[in-house]
Image (cartoon, rainbow, N blue to C red):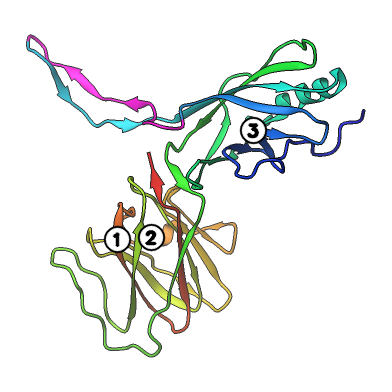
Amino acid sequence: MALPALYRPNTSTYTQFVGVAIDGWKAPGLDDYGCEWILETFEGWSGTPDLRVGGQDRPLDHGQFDQPSYLGSRVVTMQGTTICPTQTAALLASDIVSSICSDPSQLYLLQVAEPSGIVRRANVRLNTPTKVSDLIDGTIRWQIQVKAPDPRRYDDNETVIVLTPPTGASGGITVPFTVPFTISTTGLGSSTATAVNNGTFATRPVVTLAGPLVDPQIAHLGVGRSLSLTITLAAGDVLVVDFDKRTVTLNGSASRSNTLTDTAAWWELAPGGNDLMLTAGGGSGTATIRYRSALL
């Protein structure tokens, strides 16, 4: 029996899929060779991830001096059994388990379908060697452990907001927050929108600026922080600003982080509503804000 180019279990026999999907593989599921994939243990997805708690013991005193603390990565363990009608099919299933997320340099999309119908996701890579038991009567047991460097659990659905500066704006804008926070207003137009994070933890957007735009600024009005750039984008130019990686890339590959002004400040989308504003000159360009609601 030859191994096909992409051999993965499917969920065609399930009226509602509840389980995990990663690197084209799903469990629970029934594959085309009659193998039943049973997911028995799924740990680390719910609850908080690891913690990196900082502190320094007080000399000759009780307690510690408090220090900044952060979340660590999220480790998820999947364990189960595969029951196959023949030993040949079981050997194929064993090979498939070993092939999941096989490139340790790559992040793979992990999707989790919950009984409520909600699907959440994270990007993961193998954390420990995958374990596959010896074949016994057409049955194998397996364990896959992955690590998500970003511990957030993201909504599988992406929210997209498009902002366009008003055409012909030349009289400046009204700054809706108090000093000392200020932004340049000369000859610029502004556009506002509310980004709603339906999760429980702050998420970070990716903003795509398409020209023509001059000196765009993307402000979070609620926290009084603005990411401002000194750059002229011609028609056809695309500048991608990744708030998680903190990168600025022009036309797919050229770094333009040097266009960030001295006062540029990165921000996040807190749970609930976030009032955002695009300020720019140059006419008919756009800012497309993409994000996913996030939970711990």
Mark 3 lies on a secondary structure that is strand
The residue positioned 43% from the left and 31% from the top of the image is 73
Q: In the image, residue 218 lies at what x, y percent?
A: 35, 66
Neighbor class of circle 2 (other Cα within 10 Å; few <14, some 14-19, many 20+) is some
Mark 1 lies on a secondary structure that is strand
Residue tagged 3: 27
**The disc label shown at residue 238, or none:** none
Mark toward the viewer: 2 or 3? 3
Mark toward the viewer: 3 or 1? 3
**Quadrant of the rendered image containing residue 257:** bottom left
**The disc label shown at residue 260, or none:** 2
Is the residue 194 above or below the residue 96 in the image?
below
**Quadrant of the rendered image containing residue 138:** top right
Q: CA distance from mark 1 to mark 2?
A: 26 Å
Determine if the magenta segment contains residue 17. Answer: no
Residue tagged 1: 273
Is the residue 40 above or below the residue 45 in the image?
above
